[in-house]
Image (spheres, helix red, strand yellow):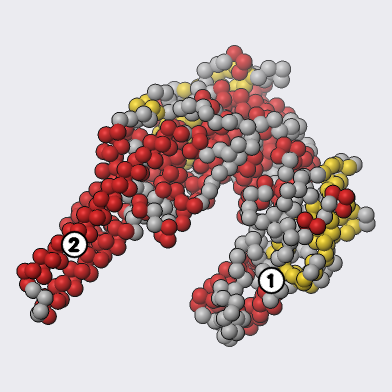
């Protein structure tokens, strides 16, 4: 039987929610053999599981699975996942997209994609395959199984724990946190010496308070490719019972939820430096899963409106209160211990002075050594983030509040897809649940058609013209200048994604409303005012490597670049959204010219700014606004004569290029003197003109 005949023998009904499922034989764990069980209708509530994984690359020779005597080529990662499922769970019925869907039949793929939300939400379990285990991943899984004091909880379902506990439990955990560091110090110091003990103590106060764990361990787990592909997002957050599989390790989803919540709490209350770029992805997955699956929360007390903030504290109030209670008692014990330690050292110093006196050199040396040791111990003790000293604990002021549009747009922009259309087809089920109106998947449409429709749908859903930020600095040549290329990683651009929804300190059009319309299916019409034009700009900046820094006195590149930058800084701050001060020294400092500041500090400061401009394809420009000449930054494809425009509902100035009666969208600008609404307040609605983008 050929492959096409195998699929033809199990036809899928377009009128029903029908899928094929795969039976895995559990008798030969390392030699995948299976059979396509048949076609099931999801409306009949069949019992099956689903696999979420990254396809990965095909290898030569290709890996194959034998289904009913027919060989189906699969990727190495799919092969490894199936072997792991067989080892860990025995015979199972599972849906695997690369096997259960005829990948050679584009029409079948288009009809199955809209069902993926139903497939994963109907599956008894969704197995999330992160890849093979390693030394670091094994340690991470072991830690995540117990992080956040899960061993103290009582299990009341597969998805959450009961967190009500007696007061004694709070004090027991707080005592454990208080003595753990010093027990580790004594153990390490006894085995390897005093300095080793001090190093262990210093390292322990920088990690999660319940257990010392290397950040690289968590980073390895959180940075697995699965978390960065667009298809896997909906597979995880729409699943009712996800299960993490990493090699032979199996981790329940509730352990992920409570571990993420605990680490978030630790970062806010203990200053734990989490790998934000990696940890943030998993935090968003958990937040979106809790939003979509309210039955997975211990108690549903959250307003489910799209504009409400979604935080772990609000989703899990009992558990967060439990952690707050522990932190409070831990802090009390720490203050008691600090007071006791200071009194103890004072007593020791007094007894030594009373015993050997203070007049001899020997007594003075002994006293000095004891005082030094006391200061070291008290200093390390005071560095513990449990005391929440403001100077050493800036992270507690960090706000990570998100709403649903912000979280979804961030994941859409950051995740990767091989086919640019899949940025939306891969999240089609999520958008359907959120009432974002998209056409069914159709691979005959061009990427620009798909991205244009998606942009307009998201614009209607969010009512935020800040979405135009996604089109700034676009590299692809779409016919419509305002249509974003969603295939690009927009989170790596100059402006932070939070500007999409006007959640940053700068807003050039405060209190304005998003006013837009679509004309002739291709023209986006805004309301705004032309402020000025670009009268001069720099050439694109070259990236300055270590060699350019070392040879700054021999080669003119760095000095000339700094001189150019300084000439623009005299008129204002051209990079104020990323760097608050254009000069690290006080304005009153004599000879305050960065090109002459050749110290290591000065060089690194300026190179950081210039390389950020280079990497983000930004240049500096000069312009004139009411009352002053000023400067700013803009995309490097801007030209002299391009216009600086403020548009209603758009948080940042626009760079537009006249083209007849309409304009080409070049990108966003930052302009010193416009960013806080200084000029926008002079306009009324009657003063605004139509701005037609083509």
Instruction: Give whichever of 67, 282 is nearer the camera.
Output: 282
- 266 and 72: which one is in front? 266
Q: Is residue 41 above or below residue 102?
A: above
Q: Is residue 212 left or right of residue 341?
A: right
Q: Which disc number belongs to residue 572?
A: 1
Does the rendering let one see residue 456?
Answer: yes
Sequence order check, earlier mark of 1 and 2: 2
Number of other residues with Cα within 10 Å of mark 1, as a class: few under 14, some 14 to 19, many 20 or more: many
Instruction: Please indicate whether residue 643 sits to the left or right of residue 595 in the image.
Output: right
SS at circle 1:
loop
Q: Give the distance between the C-alpha atoms of the residues marked 1 and 2, in whole angstroms.
A: 54 Å
Q: Position of residue 389 (x, y in %)?
A: 39, 57
**Which residue occupies 77% across, 72% down?**
629
Query: What residue is rendered at 49% in x and 38% in y?
Result: 312
Residue ID for mark 2: 345
Quadrant housing residue 667: bottom right
Residue 302 coordinates in the image, percent (x, y): 55, 31
Dividing the picture into quadrants, the one containing residue 569 is bottom right
From this viewpoint, which residue is outermost toward the top? 44
Quadrant (top left, top right, bottom left, bottom right) of the N terminus: top right
């Amino acid at each position: 039987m050929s492959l096409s005949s195998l699929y033809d023998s199990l036809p899928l009904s377009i009128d029903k929610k029908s899928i094929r499922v795969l039976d895995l034989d559990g008798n030969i764990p390392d030699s995948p053999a299976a059979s396509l069980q048949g076609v099931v209708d999801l409306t009949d509530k069949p019992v099956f599981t689903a696999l979420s994984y990254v396809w990965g690359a095909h290898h030569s020779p290709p890996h194959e699975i034998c289904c009913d005597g027919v060989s189906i080529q699969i990727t190495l990662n799919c092969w490894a996942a199936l072997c792991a499922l067989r080892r860990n769970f025995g015979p199972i019925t599972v849906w695997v997209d690369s096997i259960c869907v005829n990948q050679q039949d584009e029409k079948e793929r288009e009809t199955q994609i809209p069902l993926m939300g139903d497939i994963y939400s109907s599956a008894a379990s969704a197995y999330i395959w992160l890849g093979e285990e390693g030394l670091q991943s094994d340690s991470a899984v072991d830690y995540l199984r117990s992080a956040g004091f899960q061993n103290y909880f009582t299990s009341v379902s597969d998805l959450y724990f009961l967190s009500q506990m007696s007061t004694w439990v709070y004090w027991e955990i707080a005592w454990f946190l208080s003595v753990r560091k010093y027990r580790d110090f004594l153990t390490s110091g006894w085995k390897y010496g005093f300095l080793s003990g001090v190093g262990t103590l210093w390292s322990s106060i920088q990690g999660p308070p319940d257990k010392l764990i290397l950040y690289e361990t968590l980073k390895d787990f959180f940075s697995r490719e699965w978390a960065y592909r667009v298809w896997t997002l909906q597979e995880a957050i729409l699943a009712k019972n996800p299960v993490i599989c990493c090699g032979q390790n199996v981790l329940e989803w509730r352990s992920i939820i409570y571990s993420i919540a605990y680490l978030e709490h630790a970062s806010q209350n203990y200053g734990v430096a989490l790998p934000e770029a990696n940890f943030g992805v998993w935090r968003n997955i958990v937040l979106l899963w809790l939003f979509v699956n309210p039955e997975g929360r211990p108690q549903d007390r959250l307003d489910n409106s799209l504009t409400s903030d979604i935080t772990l504290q609000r989703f899990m109030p009992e558990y967060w209160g439990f952690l707050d209670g522990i932190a409070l008692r831990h802090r009390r014990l720490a203050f008691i211990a600090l007071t006791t330690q200071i009194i103890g050292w004072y007593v020791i110093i007094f007894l030594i002075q009373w015993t050997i006196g203070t007049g001899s050199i020997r007594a003075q040396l002994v006293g000095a050594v004891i005082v030094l040791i006391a200061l070291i111990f008290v200093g390390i003790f005071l560095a513990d983030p449990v005391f929440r000293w403001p100077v050493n604990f800036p992270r507690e002021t960090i706000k990570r509040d998100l709403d649903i549009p912000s979280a979804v747009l961030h994941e859409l922009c950051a995740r990767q897809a091989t086919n640019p259309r899949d940025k939306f087809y891969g999240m089609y089920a999520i958008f359907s649940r959120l009432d974002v109106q998209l056409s069914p998947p159709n691979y005959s449409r061009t990427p620009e058609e798909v991205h244009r429709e998606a942009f307009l749908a998201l614009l209607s859903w969010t009512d935020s013209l800040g979405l135009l930020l996604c089109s700034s600095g676009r590299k692809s040549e779409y016919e419509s200048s305002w249509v974003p290329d969603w295939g690009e990683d927009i989170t790596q651009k100059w402006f932070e994604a939070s500007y999409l929804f006007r959640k940053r300190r700068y807003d050039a059009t405060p209190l304005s409303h998003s006013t837009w319309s679509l004309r002739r299916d291709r023209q986006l019409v805004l309301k705004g005012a032309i402020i000025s034009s670009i009268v001069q700009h720099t050439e694109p900046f070259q990236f300055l490597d270590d060699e350019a820094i070392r040879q700054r006195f021999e080669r003119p590149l760095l000095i000339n670049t700094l001189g150019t930058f300084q000439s623009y800084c005299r008129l204002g701050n051209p990079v104020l959204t990323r760097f608050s001060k254009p000069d690290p020294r006080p304005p009153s400092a004599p000879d305050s010219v960065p090109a002459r500041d050749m110290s290591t500090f000065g060089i690194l400061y300026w190179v950081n700014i210039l390389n950020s401009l280079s990497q983000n394809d930004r240049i500096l420009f000069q312009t004139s606004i009411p009352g002053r000449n000023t400067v700013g930054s803009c995309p490097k494809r801007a030209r002299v004569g391009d216009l600086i425009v403020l548009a209603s509902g758009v948080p940042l100035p626009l760079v537009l290029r006249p083209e007849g009666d309409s304009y080409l969208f070049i990108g966003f600008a930052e302009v010193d003197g416009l960013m806080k609404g200084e000029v926008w307040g002079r306009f009324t609605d009657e003063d605004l003109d139509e701005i037609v983008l083509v």
